[in-house]
Image: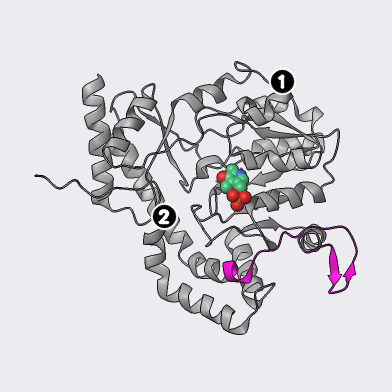
């Protein structure tokens, strides 16, 4: 009887904890010992480190990536009657805060090569929107300079949903390199456990170079407070716990190396899967350096390949099977199937293969072998 090989998950949070265990346990113990659960020293320390990582003047720790988006759009005055340009190929959290504020998401078609917001498609709606908010989806930077130029011409603020793109880089025409969340009014990050930088629960951050905007977001995240008993504006309970900041501070120290490992794994997948069946990996546009939150391939045989990999004990996934404009929750917007053909084709064909810094070469070779075995049968 042969022993079936161990499962390979889509992400492995246990392996991540095992690497950081000593540092995380000590950091958490110290927060607990000092009972600095809310706005403790570790939060300010993490904020300074994360701002340095992103190359921004400020990072403000908040309760989740969704909270970051909510605070930023609120601070920009988004409200009833407004529209915000977002892609439909994204997680629903990109759009929900727009709806909470009484505004409407305006779904923009994607560039099928990268999965990100298409600059030409944005051009036709830019005159109708209050804010432009592309998503660096799968950890691949969007056409930041192109989108920023359009937004600047129209006088519309640019916000980056960088929830999947911690450390992703974009080289500007001047040769200067900026990181995701560092080339707009504000970047919104998620530290959901499975993200490239993941907390032990919900957490997020807002990055910005604007001192006044940073002060506004700091106030808004904490009940509109200026001092303990003084509330200048109506705010929210969108703080990041000190315990989460302590965990994130430890894990941030290896994030650049972890992203490099993801890039190496992605390059190995792309090399080994070249010419296998009809597989097409996402391309990395010139001047952009992705951080491979997901490793995405497209194939017309997506559902069969997914079933094959699952049967072989390999945790492949789909990000995302149903675009936002086709979600029941957004049916009332009246955007129909067929209205965003590139987005819909992407959703029908995309498949995410396991990628995380601790994925071993042997594990990756097994994933590749199973993909090859599948296509040997279908073709
Ligand atoms: C994860 C994610 C969010 C939301 O972040 P949470 O921390 O889960 O609230 C928003 N946008 C995108 C693109 C995401 O992947």
Residue situated furthest top in the rendering = 338
**Toward which corner of the image does residue 267 lie, by quadrant?**
top left
Give the mark, 2 or 1, whose residue is nearer the N terminus.
2
237 drawn magenta: yes
The residue nearer to you, when weighing 267 against 311, is: 311
Tell whether 186 sits left or right of 102. Answer: left
Q: Main secondary structure of the magenta part?
A: loop
Residue at image x 28%, y 53%?
Answer: 360
Q: Which residue is mark 1?
A: 334
Q: Which mark is residue 190?
A: none
The residue nearer to you, when weighing 174 against 347, is: 347
Q: Position of residue 196 (x, y in %)?
A: 49, 54
Mark 2 neighbour density, 10 Å: few (under 14) some (14–19) many (20 or more)? some
Q: Is residue 281 visible?
A: yes
Indicate yes or no: mark 2 CB to ligand 1 under 8 Å. Answer: no
Q: Which residue is mark 2?
A: 260
Please say if 173 is above or below 35. Answer: above
Tell whether 297 sits left or right of 57. Answer: left
277 drawn magenta: no
Q: Which residues are magenta?
A: 222-245
Residue situated furthest bottom in the rendering = 33
Tell whether 289 sits left or right of 174. Answer: left
């Amino acid at each position: 009887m042969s022993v079936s090989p161990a499962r390979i998950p889509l992400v492995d949070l246990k392996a991540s904890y095992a690497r950081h265990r000593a540092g995380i346990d000590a950091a958490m113990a110290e927060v607990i010992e000092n009972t600095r659960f809310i706005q403790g020293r570790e939060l300010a320390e993490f904020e300074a480190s994360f701002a340095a990582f992103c190359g921004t003047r400020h990072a403000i720790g908040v309760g989740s990536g969704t909270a970051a988006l909510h605070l930023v759009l609120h601070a920009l005055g988004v409200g009833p009657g407004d529209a915000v340009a977002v892609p439909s190929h994204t997680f629903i959290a990109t759009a929900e805060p727009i709806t909470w504020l009484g505004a409407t998401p305006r779904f923009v078609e994607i560039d099928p090569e990268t999965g990100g917001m298409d600059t030409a498609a944005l051009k036709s709606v830019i005159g109708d929107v209050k804010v432009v908010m592309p998503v660096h989806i799968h950890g691949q930077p969007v056409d930041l300079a192109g989108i920023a130029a359009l937004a600047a011409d129209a006088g519309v603020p640019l916000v980056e949903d960088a929830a999947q793109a911690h450390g992703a880089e974009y080289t500007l025409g001047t040769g200067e390199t900026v990181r995701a969340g560092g080339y707009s009014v504000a970047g919104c990050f998620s530290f959901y456990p499975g993200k490239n930088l993941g907390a032990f629960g919900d957490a997020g951050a807002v990055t910005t170079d604007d001192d006044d905007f940073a002060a506004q977001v700091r106030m808004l995240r904490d009940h509109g407070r200026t001092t303990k008993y003084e509330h200048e504006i109506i705010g929210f309970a969108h703080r990041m716990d000190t315990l989460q900041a302590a965990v994130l501070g430890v894990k941030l120290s290896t994030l650049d190396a972890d992203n490099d490992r993801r890039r190496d794994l992605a390059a190995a997948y792309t090399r080994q899967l070249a010419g296998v069946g009809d597989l097409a990996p996402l391309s990395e546009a010139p001047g952009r350096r992705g951080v491979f939150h997901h490793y995405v391939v497209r194939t017309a045989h997506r559902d069969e390949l997914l079933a094959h990999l699952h049967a072989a004990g390999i945790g492949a996934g789909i990000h995302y099977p149903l675009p936002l404009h086709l979600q029941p929750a957004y049916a009332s917007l009246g955007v129909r199937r067929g209205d965003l053909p590139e987005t819909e084709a992407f959703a029908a064909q995309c498949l995410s293969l396991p990628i995380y810094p601790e994925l071993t070469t042997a594990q990756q070779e097994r994933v590749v072998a199973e993909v090859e075995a599948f296509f040997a049968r279908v073709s």
